[in-house]
Amino acid sequence: MNPQKVIMTSRDLAKGKEAAGEIPTRLTREIWELDLANFDDTVKFARRANEQLDRLDIVIFSAAMLIKVALSINVYTVTEDGYETSWVYRTRRWVP
């Protein structure tokens, strides 16, 4: 792979830009708005990626959120669209 840029996503663009500034890299960084708990946002992101990117090599999901939720007990939440988000709890067994 010869990556040319990193695309970070955030529900809050200002916070995303702040976080991007803290990551040292020689690559171009772009911040795209994305709320993974919002199905429409996810669809918009996918369409934008298909239109603007030649390829997508790696996807890294929000590990901080995963660990936070995975360490919780009896977590059950749903998005505004009605999708269950508590599935991440099942990954608890993989967290040391």
Image (cartoon, grey):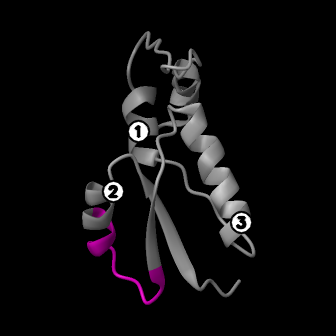
Label 3, secondary structure: give it.
Answer: helix
Q: Is residue 25 above or below residue 34?
A: below
What's drawn in magenta, residue-wise? 19-28
- The mark nearer the N terminus, 1 or 2, is 2
Disc 3 marks which residue? 51
Q: Report the Cα–Cα distance between label 1 and label 2.
A: 17 Å
Is the stretch drawn in magenta largely helix, strand or loop?
A: loop
In the rendered image, is residue 20 in sight?
A: yes
- Identity, as a three-letter code, of the amino acid under mark 2: Leu
Left or right of residue 31, residue 23 in this image: left
Q: Quadrant of residue 4?
A: bottom right
Q: Nearer the viewer, mark 1 or mark 3?
A: 3
Q: Is residue 42 above or below residue 31?
A: above
Disc 1 marks which residue? 65
Q: Residue at x 52, y 39 (%)?
A: 36
Q: Residue at x 67, y 52 (%)?
A: 46
Left or right of residue 5, residue 16 in this image: left
Label 1, secondary structure: give it.
Answer: helix
Q: Alpha-carbon neighbours of circle 2 within 10 Å: few (<14), some, or many (≥20)?
A: some
Disc 2 marks which residue? 13
